[in-house]
Image (cartoon, rainbow, N blue to C red):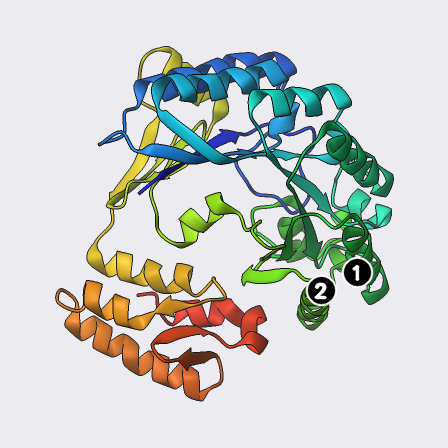
Amino acid sequence: MNLGVYIQVPFCQTKCTYCNFHTGVVSRDRYQPYAEAVCREIASVKFPDAPTIDTVYFGGGTPSLLDPSALAEILGTLWRNYCVEAVEITIEADPETITPEKARAWLAAGFNRISLGAQSFDDRELQSAGRMHRRADIYRAVELLRSAGFPNISMDLIAGLPHQTAESWEESVSGLLRIRPEHVSIYMLEIDEGSRLGKERLAGGGRYSAGAIPCDDAIADFYESARARLAGEGYEHYEISNWALAGCASRHNLKYWRREPYLGFGAGAHSFDGRTRWANAHDAARYTTMVGQGFSPREQIEAVTPAQALEEEFFLGLRQLEGIDLARIERDYGPRLHERVANLRSRIAALRSGGLLEMEAERLRLSPGRLTVSNEVFAEFLG
């Protein structure tokens, strides 16, 4: 089985109001030492059986803030230390960070896919969320990327941003469809209690436009509307939050949902080898120091038990619109977890009778009209 590699770049120009990721706004002079630490970590880690790397994903944070030469050196370090036959190499970028020079340098380094953080085409929504770019920057960025020759662009929108209305949402979806990226992600806003927006809303305050967040029903309507429009434009809905034109589904992200192995490098990056999960130290400065001093940055190392693996099969597998093969689940887990598998069968029956799940032969999937309440279904398979 081939291996995916994730590179975490935990730096941003600003912190979005709804974000509670382990990212930060730091001086640019910390970028290069961090990139050098990532290269050292890559060179020090050996994966059993030397598998082939076929996907690489630079996420964050905002990887496009790093100098292109630093990104190229990280890729070069991967090439020197692993067998790499990457068919998909992705970099996340914010629209305002893209220049013609960067776009050409990324392609020259080997990147062939870009994930563009559009989030909205409405300037008021972008401003209230703490984003640096505006609607015009999105169109400009796409023009630069296409002119440079990028063959695969992914774009995201967030349903539920403060001040969002049915009209502004439809205009954002229209803006995206005018661009027609190869891949689309639609996320429904989840307010994290640790974010600035979440704390303000809990306190009943008005900062960060906390009082202008659409209600849950409106957010669900936005999602369903986008879903219908994307289907009408030929996009395949293959995961709850993701759509793609033919052949353009995210190969890297599919590894997560299919429980395939991946290695993560950088501060806060996660890894999974099929049996064990682990994460690196989250603080970027601490991570850089640890790697520079020759210490492993790994933390939170946890062996995945058969029972945990079974839970993951359900809440990750059901995220995919194709669903999961129950016959395979029983074949793989039944001998060890016979009683638990039988118990899950009864839960499935109850969820099917409630219209939340549907089954075709032995393939179980979320009911198409209940995707917006998927978390309620997933909770039934945990614990």
Q: Quadrant of the C terminus?
A: bottom left
Residue at image location 21% in from the left, 57% down from the top:
306
Q: Where is residue 164 in the image (x, y as percent from the top left)?
A: 79, 59
In terms of image quadrants, where is residue 330?
bottom left
Residue at image location 58% in from the left, 62% down from the top:
237
The one nearer the camera, 360 or 93, is: 360
The one nearer the camera, 377 or 49, is: 49
Q: Where is residue 83 in the image (x, y as percent from the top left)?
A: 35, 26
Residue situated furthest bottom in the rendering: 353
Residue type at mark 2?
Ala
Numbered tag placed on residue 226 in the rendering = 2
Left or right of 326: which side holds 84?
right
In terms of image quadrants, where is residue 232?
bottom right
Question: Mark 2: few, some, or many residues within 10 Å (few <14, many ≥20)?
Answer: some
Quote the CA–CA distance across marks 2 and 1.
Answer: 9 Å
Left or right of 311: which side holds 170?
right
Q: Is residue 33 visible?
A: yes
Does 187 appear above or below 95?
A: below
Residue type at mark 1?
Trp
Does 119 appear above or below 271?
A: below
